[in-house]
Image (tube, rainbow, N blue to C red):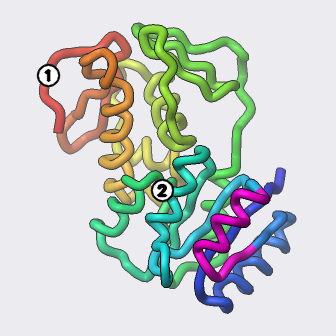
Amino acid sequence: MPGRILIIDDEPQITRVLRAALSAQGYDVRTANDPEEGLQVYREWPPDLVVTDLMMPGLSGVEVTRAIRARAATPVLILSVRDHERSKVEALDAGADDYITKPFSIQELLARVRAHLRRAPERTTAAIEAGDFVIDANAHAITVLGNAIHLTPKEFDLLLHLARNAGKVMTHRALLTTVWGAQSAHQPEYLRVFVGQLRKKLEAETGKQYIQTEPWVGYRFIPEGWSGNQD
C-alpha cells in the first residue's frame, strides 16, 4: 500500500518533480528544501521513507541520515551527483538504505521506493530458530543467545535471507538482487558495508563469527558461529 514519503533536497525543481511523480502513484508526500526544516517535518510527521540529497547547505544528507537513525529505522534513500564508491560507502555507513546517482530515471526511483516500502507477507508466523538465533520475520525482531539486537530494515532483510539459507553460499548477485532489487545487482559496495555492519552487531556480545566470506563468490551464514578469518 502507498505510504508517507518525505523528500529533502535544496533544489526546488527536484522536489517538485519527485513530489509530482510520487503523488501520482498514490503516496502521501511532503517536501523540504532545507535539511533542518526536513528534520522538523520528520519529527512532526513521521514518514515511511525519506529521500534526501547528499550535498546541501547546512546539514549534509549523511548528517540527516544520522539524525534519523538516532530516532528510528525509517528507510533512507540518498540522491547524489557523486558516483564515487567512497561517497556511497560513507552514506551507507551512516545508516542509509540506498543510494541513487543523479541523473536518474523516475521509473528507477519508483522501483527503489517500492522495494524499500514493500513488506512481503510471510508464509508462516513461526519464528526461525537456528543455532544462536531466533528471528521473528513478522515482528522484525531478532535475538542472539537471548539478547535482542537492533537492526535497520535492510540489515534485517539481509540477515533474514541469509538465515533462510543457513549453511549455503549465497552469491553477491543473489543477495543484492533479493535485498535491494535487480537494479543493484552490480553494486557490491552495498554488501561490503551491510555485511560489515551485521558482523559488528551480531558478534559484539558473543565474540563468535557468524558470516563467512567466500572469496569472489559471496557469503555463508553459520548460525552457530565459526572460527576463521574475515575480510
Please check the rendered image and state whether residue 24 is part of the magenta-colored stretch, yes or no: no
Q: Quadrant of residue 76?
A: bottom right
CA gap between label 2 and label 1 equals 32 Å
Q: Which residue is mark 2?
A: 66
Q: Which residue is mark 1?
A: 228
Viewer-proximal residue among 69 and 212: 69
2 or 1: tag closer to the N-terminus: 2
Q: Position of residue 24 (x, y in %)?
A: 84, 73
Label 2 element class: helix
The correct choice, above or below, for 53 with respect to 225 in the image is below
Q: Residue at x 53, y 48 (%)?
A: 70
Image: magenta residue range: 31-45
* Res. 101 visible in picture: no
Dominant SS of magenta comes to: helix
Q: Which amino acid type corresponds to the residue marked 2 in the rendered image?
A: Arg
Q: Position of residue 29 (x, y in %)?
A: 79, 69
